């Protein structure tokens, strides 16, 4: 018969505590964003308002991505990266949501109304 050790109980408490913290603090924002910022190679290149329909194609050595903004949402389409994960991420509209295309080093980030809501890469 196996005896429960103090270390086992402590490990269980730590795992449960971390799980609860991740659930509480890792929850996605429910606040609508105001704009999207476009980062290429970690540098902010452009900012677009989510309420202004936009279509912009970004060209890179390895291919292209097209950013579409419509109905308050942003998404990537016409992506020619090998796995197309950025296209499969779908649309984003809430503060803090991000679409990333690793092969093209492109990030689309939803921001809020104030500078305090900014995400820096």
Image (cartoon, grey):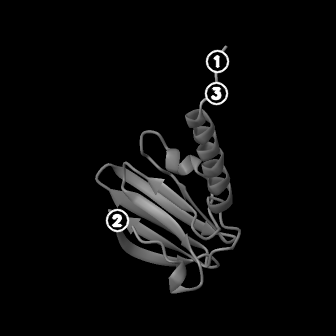
**Quarter that holds the N terminus:** top right
N-term-proximal mark, 2 vs 1: 1
Q: Nearer the viewer, mark 2 or mark 1?
A: 1
Q: Nearer the viewer, mark 2 or mark 3?
A: 3
**Residue at (64%, 18%) from the top-left corner?**
2
State the quadrant of the C terminus: bottom left
From the top left corner, tell me how far across and down residue 64 is, in percent: 40, 54
Q: CA distance from mark 3 to mark 1?
A: 7 Å
Rendering quarter of residue 5: top right
Q: Residues within 10 Å of mark 2 (few under 14, many from 20)?
A: few
Q: Is disc 3 in contact with disc 1, using a CB cutoff of under 8 Å? A: yes
Location of mark 3 (residue):
4
Is residue 111 found left or right of 94 in the rendered image? left
Q: Residue at x 54, y 78 (%)?
A: 117
Image coordinates of residue 28 in percent, x first then y, are 65, 61
Tell me where residue 34 appears, x and y as whole percent.
61, 79
In the displayed structure, 35 sits above or below 82; it is below
Residue at image coords 70%, 70%? 71
Q: Mark 3 falls on what kind of element?
A: loop
Q: In the image, which disc is placed on residue 2?
A: 1
Which residue is pictured at 40% across the width and 62% down the height?
58
* Mark identifier at residue 95: none
The picture places residue 46, in percent across and down from the top left corner, at 42, 76
Residue labelled with disc 2: 42
- Nearer to me, 34 or 29: 29
For label 2, the SS is loop
Crowding around mark 1 (Cα neighbors within 10 Å: few <14, some 14 to 19, many 20+) is: few
Give whichever of 44, 76 is nearer the camera: 44
Image quadrant of residue 106?
bottom left
Q: Is residue 24 above or below residue 82?
A: below
Q: Please, is residue 73 above or below residue 112 in the view?
A: above
Nearest to N terminus: mark 2 or mark 3: 3
């Amino acid at each position: 018969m196996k005896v429960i050790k103090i270390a086992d109980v402590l490990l269980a408490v730590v795992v449960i505590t971390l799980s609860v913290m991740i659930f509480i603090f890792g929850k996605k924002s429910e606040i609508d964003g105001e704009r999207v910022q476009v980062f290429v190679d970690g540098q902010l290149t452009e900012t677009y308002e989510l309420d202004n329909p936009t279509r912009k194609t970004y060209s890179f050595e390895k291919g292209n991505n097209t950013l579409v903004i419509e109905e308050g949402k942003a998404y990537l389409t016409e992506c020619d990266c090998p796995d197309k994960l950025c296209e499969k991420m779908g649309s984003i509209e809430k503060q803090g949501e991000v679409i990333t295309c690793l092969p093209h080093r492109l990030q689309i980030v939803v921001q809020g109304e104030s500078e305090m809501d900014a995400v820096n890469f």
